Image (cartoon, rainbow, N blue to C red):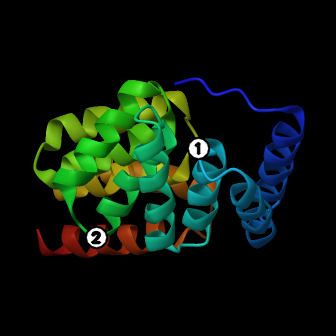
Amino acid sequence: MATSYNNQTVELLEEAERLKLNCKHEESISLLENLLSDDPGNVAALEEIADNELSLERYERAAAAAKQAVALDKESYMGHYVLGFYASSKGDWKTATESLRIANSIKSNNSEILRCLGWALFNQGEKVRGIVTLERSLNLDLDNVLTLCDLGVCYMQSGDLKKSLSIFSGVLDLDATNERALECINMLKKLKTYK
């Protein structure tokens, strides 16, 4: 459902987006909440609140805003994405996969949606489909460290230690202090010595 907003609302949404991109999440949320007080059905404001709350790792608040957005607009890809992310954070892979598939059907070829979907699929037991989906995400954003790390873990858990080590080494080429990659490389070295 395409919604049109008046110029003032568009300007406020754009300002909230600028604040979010500058990591001023609390200021962005405050602006958006003021917008919602005048227009409680503003789906874009709810989506932006959900995204800001996600960045602040306040997952329950993010999910609450996302649920409202989806209730108002079933085509809210951001709402479905946030709900999928939230379900993933709780290890509810079935719900995560369902929500992320909906988000992907609404907004296809979004690397972040595909990354989360691939991770959820893999953890739900659809290992090959999960890896393929993560590879698709990586093809859209080649230097995405989060995707590379997720893929490295999937290959490690699938027993392809050589591929996993190669991926984590690539992560360190992009970010030499990446803790997840360093931990996984240490784990892979230990696994190799026990084989």
- Type of the residue with mark 2: Lys
Q: Tell me which residue sits at (47%, 42%) in the image.
A: 72
Residue 91 higher or lower than 39, as above or below: below
Residue 47 higher or lower than 56, as above or below: above
Q: Position of residue 163 (x, y in %)?
A: 30, 46
Element type at marker 1?
Answer: helix
Q: Is residue 21 left or right of residue 60?
A: right
> Does any portion of residue 101 appear in the rendered image?
yes
**The residue positioned farthest toward the front in the image shown:** 38
Residue 123 higher or lower than 102, as above or below: below
Element type at marker 2?
Answer: loop
Q: Nearer the viewer, residue 25 or 148?
A: 25
Q: Quadrant of residue 67?
A: bottom left
Q: Is residue 63 left or right of residue 154?
A: right
Image quadrant containing the C terminus: bottom left
Q: Tell me which residue sits at (23%, 66%) in the image.
A: 91
The image's mark for residue 43 is: 1
> Does any portion of residue 160 appear in the rendered image?
no
Q: Quadrant of residue 63?
A: bottom left
Residue 119 higher or lower than 178, as above or below: above
Q: Nearer the viewer, residue 64 or 150?
A: 64
Q: Position of residue 42 (x, y in %)?
A: 64, 45
Marks 1 and 2, how far apart at CA: 25 Å
Q: How many marks?
A: 2
Q: Tell me which residue sits at (54%, 52%) in the image.
A: 145
